[in-house]
Image (tube, coloured by chain):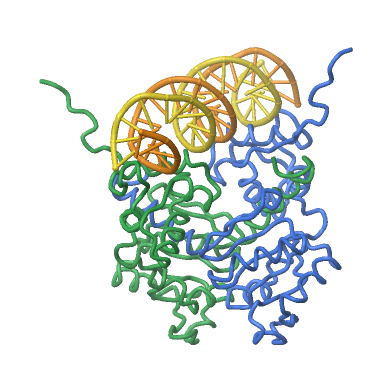
Chain colours: A green, B blue, C yellow, D orange
DNA sequence: TAGATTGTTAATCGATTAACAATC
DNA sequence: TAGATTGTTAATCGATTAACAATC
């Protein structure tokens, strides 16, 4: 009897590719607005600051979008990216932290346009509760479980003060949220089953600052 | 005559290390608050979700902070990180875009605490001009050059609507800004001498969404 | 001393780039 | 047809992990 191996192809996109997906998507969408139909790996590369080789290599992970040897079909490409990112249906998120950043997030129409639907705004500070932010009413963490279960929320966005971040993360995980976007200037840890992504602006500024410093010392970017 | 090579040691930190620097720094600072003196690579690793091997490898890039074989001296480590990131003196930034996100940025005390000093808040939309946001008055882009030169600003943070992003970036570059933090949901390109870092929240959410989707399909994180 | 921990080398793993035949 | 462009393989480059002697 022969051994079947790798039945499920563990279709695991490399992390760098995953990071580039949103960039491909935004670019492809602006092309659509201009009614373009085909796009070459070379032009794609130039627009995103990559090599055409990397683009082609990236896109081989999806075998559904090319009109071979003539470039990539923009419409099919968009569709493929949307599926890979998981945006066919609006992703539900909740925001915890009703400070300036949290407010900015739920007020902006931006998230909706990017297929994320905010199901609720929460704050660990009870005194914030009941306040209105746009169409939202700030809720306590006691309401968390209820909302997460009812709406089947997958993603929690954390925008509380640094000291409160880990506690909020723990609560979110307990409620069954599977992905966390940590926009806090503090480190948050979670069990392996939960995916954390750090997107804090302070950290980004510090990273940028390092990059500039190094560019300095070496006389410009390589 | 012998050839001298590599006089300047091109002290180039690998990009992944640079990305981790802010995490090390925040963790080391919380340790300081608890009056801890030494920390092992193992504990550091656990707190940041790395292997101790990676931590040691990372820290060999700085040969100034270890009390060999007993762990790392927290105080020295903090100092080293601050220098590597370039935070010895407050970094000057300007924010372009006075929408919700821009407002959140300049209102939060957060940036100051992280050694970034906001020199001005601008908006490409003239009708926004003159409005007060906290202690700031929104300025037009015509004032950009003036402020950048007077204050010697290195970093520009872009928080305008997507369609305006590239134009704002171009203006900032023209004014002599060397680093851009693009918080916009659109792709921005720049000449090589300028460093761009993307930190858009929409992109982060999309990345997280992909990660969740893949975790799904493979039955949990690896 | 014994246990913990570093610094460092070598091994592994992974991503990017280069090159080119196939083909629209 | 000639030029452009893909898909793919192999080569290069880079990062992470493993392992262990040195030593506090």
- Left or right for B162, reference B190: left
Give the quarter of the image for residue B146. Answer: bottom right
State the residue at coordinates (58%, 64%): B183
Residue B43 on image: x %, y %: 59, 41
Instruction: Indicate whether A159 appears above or below D4.
Output: below
Relative to the observer, which residue lies in front, A157 or A38? A38
* Residue B46, picture quadrant: top right
Measured from the top left, where is residue B45 in percent x and y? Answer: 57, 40
Which residue is painted at 49% across and 84% down in the image?
A133
- For the point 34% across and 48% down, the residue is B215
Residue ranking furthest to the left? A1
Residue A170 position, x and y percent, is 46, 60
The N terminus of chain A sits in image quarter: top left
Q: Name the residue nearer the viewer: A59 or A42.
A: A42
Residue B202's place in the image compared with A210, above or below, is below
Left or right for A130, reference B142: left
Q: How many marks?
A: 0
Who is closer to the viewer here, A100 or B132?
Answer: B132
Q: Point out residue A212 in the picture as x, y percentages from the top left corner.
A: 73, 50
* Horizontal side of residue A46 vs A205, given as left or right: left
- Quadrant where the C terminus of chain A sits is top right
Does residue A94 lie above or below B37 as drawn?
below
């Amino acid at each position: 009897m022969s051994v079947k191996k790798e039945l499920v192809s563990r279709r695991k996109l490399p992390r760098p590719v995953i990071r580039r997906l949103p960039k491909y998507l935004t670019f492809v969408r602006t092309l659509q607005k201009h009614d373009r139909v085909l796009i070459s790996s070379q032009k794609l590369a130039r627009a995103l600051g990559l090599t055409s080789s990397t683009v082609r290599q990236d896109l081989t992970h999806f075998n559904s979008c090319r009109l071979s040897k003539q470039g990539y079909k923009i419409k099919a490409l968009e569709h493929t990216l949307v599926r890979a990112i998981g945006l066919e249906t609006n992703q539900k998120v909740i925001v915890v932290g009703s400070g300036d950043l949290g407010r900015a997030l739920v007020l902006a129409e931006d998230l909706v346009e990017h297929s994320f639907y905010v199901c609720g705004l929460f704050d660990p500070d009870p005194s914030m509760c009941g306040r209105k932010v746009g169409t939202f009413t700030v809720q306590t963490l006691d309401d968390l479980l209820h909302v997460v279960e009812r709406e089947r929320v997958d993603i929690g966005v954390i925008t509380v003060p640094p000291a409160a971040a880990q506690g909020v993360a723990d609560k979110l995980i307990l409620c069954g949220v599977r992905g966390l976007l940590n926009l806090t200037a503090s480190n948050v840890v979670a069990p392996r089953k939960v995916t954390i992504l750090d997107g804090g602006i302070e950290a980004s500024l510090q990273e940028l600052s390092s990059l500039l410093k190094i560019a300095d010392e070496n006389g410009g970017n390589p």
